[in-house]
Amino acid sequence: MQLLAVIVPPPEVVRDALDAAQALCATAPSTTDEPGRGLLDRIRGRRGGASRTAPSVALRPVSSDGVFVRLAKFGNVTGDDADGLARALTAVAGSWPAPVLRTTGVSVTESEPHTVTAQLGGDVDALRAMYGHVNEVARQQRFFLDRRSFRSELVVGSVEGEDGAPLPATVVGAEAPHAGPSWAPSHITLVRASFGASGTTYSELSQIALAPCVVEPSAGSGD
Protein backbone atom coordinates (compact mmCIF):
# COMPACT_ATOMS: atom_id res chain seq x y z
CA MET A 1 0.00 0.00 0.00
CA GLN A 2 0.99 3.65 -0.46
CA LEU A 3 1.46 5.38 2.89
CA LEU A 4 1.41 9.09 3.74
CA ALA A 5 1.83 11.13 6.91
CA VAL A 6 -0.55 14.10 6.91
CA ILE A 7 -2.18 16.75 9.07
CA VAL A 8 -5.95 16.94 8.67
CA PRO A 9 -7.53 20.39 9.19
CA PRO A 10 -10.85 20.85 11.02
CA PRO A 11 -13.96 20.80 8.78
CA GLU A 12 -14.69 24.48 9.45
CA VAL A 13 -11.23 25.41 8.14
CA VAL A 14 -11.91 23.50 4.92
CA ARG A 15 -15.33 25.13 4.52
CA ASP A 16 -13.82 28.57 5.04
CA ALA A 17 -11.11 27.89 2.45
CA LEU A 18 -13.69 26.65 -0.06
CA ASP A 19 -15.78 29.78 0.44
CA ALA A 20 -12.70 31.91 -0.23
CA ALA A 21 -11.87 29.81 -3.32
CA GLN A 22 -15.43 30.14 -4.59
CA ALA A 23 -15.23 33.91 -4.24
CA LEU A 24 -11.91 33.96 -6.08
CA CYS A 25 -13.18 31.83 -8.96
CA ALA A 26 -16.54 33.57 -9.36
CA THR A 27 -16.54 35.76 -12.44
CA ALA A 28 -18.95 38.67 -12.83
CA PRO A 29 -20.88 38.54 -16.12
CA SER A 30 -18.90 40.46 -18.68
CA THR A 31 -19.03 40.96 -22.42
CA THR A 32 -16.44 41.12 -25.13
CA ASP A 33 -17.11 43.23 -28.20
CA GLU A 34 -16.47 41.59 -31.57
CA PRO A 35 -14.99 43.73 -34.36
CA GLY A 36 -17.55 45.75 -36.35
CA ARG A 37 -18.55 44.26 -39.68
CA GLY A 38 -18.14 45.82 -43.10
CA LEU A 39 -20.47 47.70 -45.46
CA LEU A 40 -22.11 44.53 -46.81
CA ASP A 41 -23.00 43.42 -43.31
CA ARG A 42 -24.58 46.79 -42.57
CA ILE A 43 -26.61 46.66 -45.80
CA ARG A 44 -27.93 43.23 -44.79
CA GLY A 45 -28.89 44.59 -41.40
CA ARG A 46 -26.23 42.79 -39.40
CA ARG A 47 -25.15 44.54 -36.25
CA GLY A 48 -21.55 45.35 -35.65
CA GLY A 49 -19.88 45.09 -32.28
CA ALA A 50 -21.75 41.97 -31.15
CA SER A 51 -21.11 40.96 -27.57
CA ARG A 52 -20.31 37.62 -26.01
CA THR A 53 -20.77 36.75 -22.36
CA ALA A 54 -17.67 35.45 -20.54
CA PRO A 55 -17.98 31.72 -19.75
CA SER A 56 -18.90 30.73 -16.21
CA VAL A 57 -16.63 28.49 -14.16
CA ALA A 58 -17.23 25.61 -11.76
CA LEU A 59 -15.26 24.84 -8.60
CA ARG A 60 -14.89 21.08 -8.04
CA PRO A 61 -14.06 20.49 -4.35
CA VAL A 62 -11.67 17.72 -3.38
CA SER A 63 -13.33 14.89 -1.46
CA SER A 64 -13.27 15.46 2.28
CA ASP A 65 -10.74 12.66 2.87
CA GLY A 66 -8.26 14.27 0.47
CA VAL A 67 -7.84 17.72 2.07
CA PHE A 68 -4.72 17.70 4.24
CA VAL A 69 -1.21 19.05 4.71
CA ARG A 70 1.12 16.38 3.37
CA LEU A 71 4.13 15.92 5.65
CA ALA A 72 5.69 12.82 4.13
CA LYS A 73 5.08 10.38 1.31
CA PHE A 74 6.45 6.84 1.41
CA GLY A 75 6.73 4.13 -1.20
CA ASN A 76 4.85 0.85 -1.16
CA VAL A 77 4.89 -0.56 2.36
CA THR A 78 3.41 -3.55 4.15
CA GLY A 79 0.93 -3.41 7.00
CA ASP A 80 3.67 -4.46 9.42
CA ASP A 81 5.90 -1.61 8.19
CA ALA A 82 3.08 0.89 8.73
CA ASP A 83 2.45 -0.43 12.24
CA GLY A 84 6.15 -0.19 13.07
CA LEU A 85 6.30 3.41 11.85
CA ALA A 86 3.22 4.31 13.89
CA ARG A 87 4.81 2.90 17.05
CA ALA A 88 8.10 4.72 16.39
CA LEU A 89 6.32 8.03 15.83
CA THR A 90 4.09 7.58 18.88
CA ALA A 91 7.19 7.16 21.05
CA VAL A 92 8.48 10.67 20.21
CA ALA A 93 5.73 12.82 18.70
CA GLY A 94 4.14 13.63 22.06
CA SER A 95 6.94 16.15 22.66
CA TRP A 96 6.52 17.93 19.30
CA PRO A 97 4.66 21.25 19.68
CA ALA A 98 1.63 21.51 17.45
CA PRO A 99 1.88 24.50 15.10
CA VAL A 100 -0.86 27.14 15.12
CA LEU A 101 -1.85 27.62 11.48
CA ARG A 102 -4.23 29.74 9.46
CA THR A 103 -5.15 30.28 5.83
CA THR A 104 -3.45 33.36 4.37
CA GLY A 105 -4.55 33.19 0.74
CA VAL A 106 -6.08 31.16 -2.08
CA SER A 107 -4.82 30.68 -5.63
CA VAL A 108 -5.46 28.91 -8.92
CA THR A 109 -2.62 27.30 -10.87
CA GLU A 110 -1.91 28.55 -14.37
CA SER A 111 -1.54 25.08 -15.90
CA GLU A 112 -4.15 22.33 -16.22
CA PRO A 113 -5.63 20.85 -14.19
CA HIS A 114 -6.29 24.22 -12.62
CA THR A 115 -5.77 23.28 -8.98
CA VAL A 116 -7.12 25.53 -6.24
CA THR A 117 -4.98 25.74 -3.11
CA ALA A 118 -5.17 27.55 0.22
CA GLN A 119 -1.79 28.77 1.46
CA LEU A 120 -0.97 28.42 5.16
CA GLY A 121 0.67 30.90 7.49
CA GLY A 122 1.31 31.04 11.20
CA ASP A 123 3.83 28.63 12.73
CA VAL A 124 5.09 27.41 9.36
CA ASP A 125 8.60 26.93 10.78
CA ALA A 126 7.18 24.54 13.39
CA LEU A 127 5.26 22.75 10.65
CA ARG A 128 8.43 22.40 8.60
CA ALA A 129 10.29 21.12 11.67
CA MET A 130 7.59 18.49 12.15
CA TYR A 131 8.09 17.42 8.54
CA GLY A 132 11.79 16.96 9.31
CA HIS A 133 11.05 14.98 12.48
CA VAL A 134 8.70 12.60 10.65
CA ASN A 135 11.24 11.99 7.92
CA GLU A 136 14.02 11.35 10.44
CA VAL A 137 11.93 8.75 12.30
CA ALA A 138 11.02 7.13 8.98
CA ARG A 139 14.67 7.08 7.91
CA GLN A 140 15.57 5.25 11.11
CA GLN A 141 12.87 2.71 10.26
CA ARG A 142 14.48 2.26 6.81
CA PHE A 143 11.62 3.79 4.84
CA PHE A 144 12.05 5.16 1.34
CA LEU A 145 11.51 8.94 1.53
CA ASP A 146 10.17 11.37 -1.04
CA ARG A 147 11.56 14.64 0.34
CA ARG A 148 9.70 16.73 -2.24
CA SER A 149 6.31 15.93 -0.72
CA PHE A 150 6.03 18.75 1.84
CA ARG A 151 3.86 21.77 1.02
CA SER A 152 2.52 24.33 3.50
CA GLU A 153 -0.85 24.42 1.75
CA LEU A 154 -4.20 22.69 1.41
CA VAL A 155 -5.41 21.52 -2.00
CA VAL A 156 -9.14 22.19 -1.81
CA GLY A 157 -10.31 21.62 -5.38
CA SER A 158 -9.94 22.42 -9.04
CA VAL A 159 -11.73 24.80 -11.36
CA GLU A 160 -12.89 24.33 -14.93
CA GLY A 161 -15.06 26.10 -17.46
CA GLU A 162 -18.62 24.86 -17.67
CA ASP A 163 -19.45 22.70 -20.70
CA GLY A 164 -15.75 22.38 -21.49
CA ALA A 165 -15.22 26.08 -22.16
CA PRO A 166 -11.74 27.49 -21.49
CA LEU A 167 -11.29 29.36 -18.22
CA PRO A 168 -11.50 33.15 -18.39
CA ALA A 169 -8.13 34.88 -18.18
CA THR A 170 -9.25 36.48 -14.92
CA VAL A 171 -9.32 33.04 -13.24
CA VAL A 172 -6.20 31.36 -14.64
CA GLY A 173 -3.38 32.02 -12.18
CA ALA A 174 -5.63 34.14 -9.96
CA GLU A 175 -4.73 34.61 -6.30
CA ALA A 176 -6.12 36.58 -3.39
CA PRO A 177 -5.28 37.08 0.29
CA HIS A 178 -7.62 35.49 2.80
CA ALA A 179 -7.45 35.53 6.60
CA GLY A 180 -8.89 32.25 7.79
CA PRO A 181 -9.45 30.99 11.36
CA SER A 182 -6.50 29.79 13.42
CA TRP A 183 -6.25 26.09 14.24
CA ALA A 184 -3.74 23.62 15.63
CA PRO A 185 -3.63 19.88 14.92
CA SER A 186 -3.89 17.49 17.85
CA HIS A 187 -2.25 14.66 15.93
CA ILE A 188 -0.51 13.45 12.79
CA THR A 189 -2.47 10.97 10.71
CA LEU A 190 -1.05 8.02 8.79
CA VAL A 191 -3.25 7.37 5.76
CA ARG A 192 -3.33 4.78 3.02
CA ALA A 193 -3.77 5.97 -0.57
CA SER A 194 -5.82 3.75 -2.90
CA PHE A 195 -5.96 4.32 -6.65
CA GLY A 196 -9.01 3.51 -8.75
CA ALA A 197 -10.89 4.49 -11.88
CA SER A 198 -12.69 7.28 -10.00
CA GLY A 199 -9.45 8.75 -8.60
CA THR A 200 -7.42 8.49 -5.42
CA THR A 201 -9.08 7.82 -2.07
CA TYR A 202 -7.56 7.94 1.40
CA SER A 203 -8.29 5.93 4.52
CA GLU A 204 -6.98 6.55 8.03
CA LEU A 205 -4.67 3.94 9.53
CA SER A 206 -3.60 5.56 12.80
CA GLN A 207 -3.33 8.85 14.69
CA ILE A 208 -0.10 10.03 16.33
CA ALA A 209 -0.75 12.45 19.21
CA LEU A 210 1.19 15.74 19.39
CA ALA A 211 1.88 17.98 22.37
CA PRO A 212 -1.31 19.87 23.34
CA CYS A 213 -1.70 23.41 22.08
CA VAL A 214 -4.15 26.17 22.99
CA VAL A 215 -5.27 28.23 20.00
CA GLU A 216 -5.97 31.89 20.68
CA PRO A 217 -8.91 33.38 18.72
CA SER A 218 -7.72 35.01 15.49
CA ALA A 219 -8.97 38.08 13.70
CA GLY A 220 -10.14 35.90 10.83
CA SER A 221 -12.11 33.50 13.03
CA GLY A 222 -14.91 35.91 13.83
CA ASP A 223 -14.46 35.44 17.59
Image (spheres, rainbow, N blue to C red):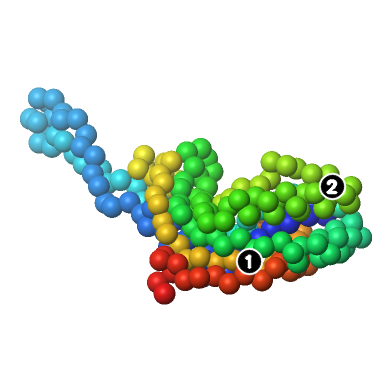
Q: Position of residue 133 (x, y in %)?
A: 75, 52
Mark 2 belongs to which amino acid?
Arg
Find residue 145 and name its label.
none
Circle 2 — which element?
helix
Q: Quadrant of residue 212?
A: bottom right
Front residue of 108/55: it is: 108
Left or right of 94: which side holds 107?
left
Q: Is residue 89 among what the camera can see? A: yes
Mark 1 → mark 2, Cα distance in angstroms: 23 Å
Left or right side of 74 for 167:
left
Q: Which residue is mark 1?
A: 185
Quadrant where the C terminus sits is: bottom left
Vertical arrangement, residue 29 with respect to residue 181, above or below: above
Residue placed farthest to the top in the image? 39
| Residue 79 appears in the figure | no
Q: Position of residue 36 (x, y in %)?
A: 15, 30
Q: Looking at the rendering, which quadrant does residue 200 occupy?
A: bottom right
Q: Position of residue 61 (x, y in %)?
A: 52, 59
Callout 1 crowding tier (Cα within 10 Å): few <14, some 14–19, many ≥20 = many
Q: Could you tell me which residue is drawn at 52 percent across and 56 percent down?
A: 122
Quadrant housing the N terminus: bottom right
Q: Nearer the viewer, residue 199 or 72?
A: 72
Classify 113 as above or below 198: above
User: What number is the disc on residue 139?
Assistant: 2
